[in-house]
């Protein structure tokens, strides 16, 4: 496994691999790797002979007052994980390497970025789409792997790739969870013991939603109200949003039908956590 920090090195090593007939898989991350990231790497390894993992805490997707400065950086541990999982190349650039001068060209994906996290974090998805476009142009993968955990991000990237005719396939992998249902996240390490216990209520609220839909409930307002109650049981949680939207368009729905995405975002202390599930009743 090689670890490189320049765009020129990545281009050279990927070019060699491609010339050797290898399929290129790509897993973009911000590091502080956990089992969620590992599942994406394993999926990539299953389909591609040469797997590139980027580790880059992208400044342009953080807003003022967010956790950019304190985002965990654990390159040694991350490298060990990648090595064990059979990663071929880690790309860990500096901000200067990725943004050598003022960035004037940006990618904006409309509509899909209006609600959910897009409403709470203005500019976030512009930063995400732009850095992914840059990384795709640097690595030029055949396939790139994203987590369902960040459902809106996956939808935005898929749409960017489709609308801009980018020559790669986006693969979305299931959310990996702790034993109590909490979605694995690099930000979980910010939580105190008490906060960590409280954090289980995110998934509990989503299970409540699934339970109600499976029980025949179709009115989103009723479901959302029960979900809020579950979140309210843990004191110290501030709900940012609880939403039920169409899983493909991410637009609000009055009633449950087809494939819906139930999504929650909360603050526990100073930590922001998100989670979601898809419930599909299109066969009913
Ligand atoms: P991040 O390092 O948080 O930017 O995440 C990098 C990639 O890992 C994104 O595509 C995330 O959606 C994905 N990811 C993060 N947490 C999980 C998880 N618990 N299960 C599956 N994928 C995840």
Image (cartoon, rainbow, N blue to C red):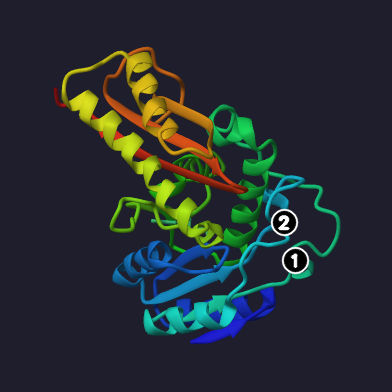
Please tell me the numbered disc located at residue 171. none
Neighbour tally class for label 2: few under 14, some 14-19, many 20 plus, Cα within 10 Å: some
Residue 108 vs residue 169: left or right? Answer: right
At 49% from the left edge and 54% from the top edge, which residue is drawn? 167
In this rendered view, identify the residue nearer to me: 66 or 27: 66
The answer to which quarter of the image holds residue 90 is bottom right
* Residue 274 visible here: yes
Q: Give me the residue at 64% from left, 55% from top.
A: 131
Q: Which residue is mark 2?
A: 59
Q: Residue furthest right?
A: 101
Q: Nearer the viewer, residue 108 or 8?
A: 108
- Residue 148 image point, x, y percent: 39, 48
For the point 68% across and 77% down, which residue is it?
Answer: 8
Front residue of 55/215: it is 215
CB under 8 Å between discs 2 and 1:
yes
Give the x, y percent position of residue 205.
35, 35
Direction from residue 283 to residue 180 in the image, left or right: right
Earlier-in-chain disc, 2 versus 1: 2
Position above or below: 134 against 14: above
Crowding at mark 1 (Cα within 10 Å: few <14, some 14-19, many 20+):
few
Q: Which residue is mark 1?
A: 95
Q: Foreground: 253 or 14?
A: 253
Which percent across, then down, holds residue 251?
46, 22
Label 2 near ligand 1 (CB < 8 Å): no
At numbered mark 1, what does the secondary structure look like: helix, strand or loop?
Answer: helix
Label 2, label 1: how far apart the Cα atoms are? 7 Å
276 left or right, relative to 117: left
Per the image, label 2 sits on a secondary structure element best described as: helix
Residue shown at the point (85%, 60%) measured from the top left? 101
Q: Is residue 59 left or right of residue 54?
A: right
């Amino acid at each position: 496994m090689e670890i490189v920090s320049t765009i020129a090195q990545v281009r050279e090593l990927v070019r060699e691999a491609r010339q050797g007939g290898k399929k290129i898989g790509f897993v973009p991350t911000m590091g502080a790797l956990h089992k969620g990231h590992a599942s994406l790497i394993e999926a990539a390894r299953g389909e591609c002979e040469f797997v590139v993992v980027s580790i880059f805490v992208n400044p342009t997707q953080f807003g003022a007052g967010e956790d950019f400065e304190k985002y965990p950086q654990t390159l040694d541990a991350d490298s060990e994980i990648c090595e064990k999982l059979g990663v071929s190349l880690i790309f860990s650039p500096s901000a200067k390497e990725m943004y050598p001068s003022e960035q004037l060209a940006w990618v904006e994906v409309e509509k899909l970025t209006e609600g959910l996290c897009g409403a709470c974090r203005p500019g976030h998805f512009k930063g995400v789409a732009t850095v992914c476009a840059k990384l795709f142009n640097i690595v030029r993968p055949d396939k790139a792997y994203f987590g369902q955990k960040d459902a809106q991000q996956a939808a935005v990237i898929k749409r960017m790739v489709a609308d801009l005719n980018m020559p790669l396939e986006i693969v979305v992998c299931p959310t990996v969870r702790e034993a109590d249902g909490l979605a694995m996240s690099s930000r979980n390490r910010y939580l105190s013991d008490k906060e960590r216990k409280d954090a289980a209520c995110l998934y509990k609220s989503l299970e409540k939603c699934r339970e109600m839909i499976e029980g025949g409930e179709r009115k989103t307002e009723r479901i959302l109200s029960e979900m809020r109650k579950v979140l309210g049981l843990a004191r110290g949680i501030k709900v940012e949003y609880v939403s039920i939207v169409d899983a493909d368009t991410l637009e609000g729905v009055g009633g449950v039908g087809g494939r819906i995405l139930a999504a929650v975002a909360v603050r526990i202390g100073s930590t922001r956590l998100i989670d979601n599930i898809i419930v599909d009743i299109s066969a009913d």
